[in-house]
């Protein structure tokens, strides 16, 4: 699986290259600026891009905008964005086209190799990987005056958070040490209470939940 990596800090970029290679990824390019990222994505056609939000020369959201432009040129190009802080706007822009193959993680997550590599693989396969802190903020914002969320049980809230992160029923069941059948029942109840269409497609249900949580911004 070929990766284009964009990170301006040399030590972090080098560390990510080594980690990805250790897990069997091929680094097609490791760049440090927006113009280099744009060129690499246009010429190398990677399986997935791992991109720091803030890149030279602007050091604003150049990395994100380069990745989004590449997704407009190649529909569904898998992009995992790394950010120092939670910025809901970044997550919103990534999800705006309603397609899969997107992820948004805080940089702290890269120090957990298993979690980071799982996110890269999930995004590369067309899934969604959202940082738990982003989900917590979206939930907190909706929870204060949201009757449907108020009808969810504590366990359903827990399942909702994991579902919104991009976890499959099997992964949620394993994490909560329950059966997949139990998780399927919880997810069905969640969709019913939130007024969402039930779907067996992991990515479609993630996007539906995220759209619900971010509704009325």
Image (spheres, helix red, strand yellow):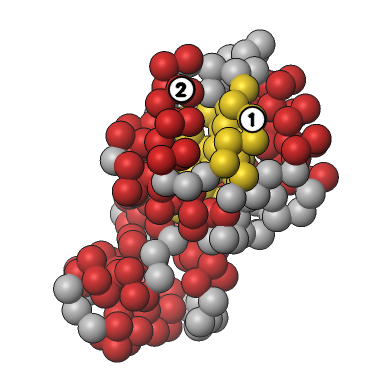
Instruction: Tell me, yes or no, if residue 216 can be seen here.
Output: no
Q: Is residue 123 above or below residue 150?
A: above
Name which residue lies at 40% across and 53% down. 118
The answer to which quarter of the image holds residue 155 is bottom left
- Tell me the element at label 2: helix
Name which residue lies at 30% across and 83% down. 180
Seen from this angle, which residue lies furthest left?
177
Between 87 and 82, the one lying in front of the other is 82
Find residue 14 and name its label.
2
Total of numbered circles in the picture? 2
Seen from this angle, which residue lies furthest top?
57
Name which residue lies at 40% across and 36% down. 19
Name which residue lies at 77% across and 27% down. 39
- Marked residue nearer the N-terminal end (2 or 1): 2
In the displayed structure, does residue 117 sit left or right of residue 151? right
Q: Give the residue pinned by disc 1.
A: 29
Instruction: Tell me, yes or no, if residue 166 can be seen here.
Output: yes
In the displayed structure, does residue 106 sit left or right of residue 111? right
Q: Residue 107's x, y, as percent?
A: 39, 31
Q: Residue 132's x, y, as percent?
A: 34, 49
Q: Residue 45's x, y, as percent?
A: 75, 43
Q: Residue 78's x, y, as percent?
A: 63, 50
- Tell me the element at label 1: strand
């Amino acid at each position: 699986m070929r990766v284009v990596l964009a990170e301006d800090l040399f030590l972090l970029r080098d560390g990510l290259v080594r980690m990805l290679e250790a897990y069997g990824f091929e680094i097609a390019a490791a760049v440090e600026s927006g113009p280099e990222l744009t060129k690499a994505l246009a010429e190398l056609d990677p399986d997935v891009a791992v991109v720091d939000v803030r890149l030279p020369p602007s050091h604003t959201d150049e990395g994100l905008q380069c990745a989004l432009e590449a997704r407009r040129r190649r529909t569904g190009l898998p992009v995992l964005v790394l950010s120092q802080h939670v910025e809901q706007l970044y997550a919103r822009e990534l999800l705006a086209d309603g397609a899969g193959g997107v992820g948004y993680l805080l940089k702290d997550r890269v120090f957990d190799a298993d979690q980071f590599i799982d996110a890269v693989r999930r995004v590369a396969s067309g899934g969604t990987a959202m940082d738990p802190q982003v989900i917590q903020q979206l939930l907190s914002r909706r929870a204060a005056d949201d009757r449907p969320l108020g009808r969810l049980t504590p366990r359903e809230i827990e399942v909702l958070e994991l579902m919104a992160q991009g976890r499959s029923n099997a992964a949620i069941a394993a994490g909560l040490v329950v059966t997949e059948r139990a998780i399927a029942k919880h997810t069905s109840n969640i969709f019913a209470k939130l007024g969402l269409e039930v779907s067996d497609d992991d990515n479609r249900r993630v996007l539906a939940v995220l759209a619900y949580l971010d509704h009325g911004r």
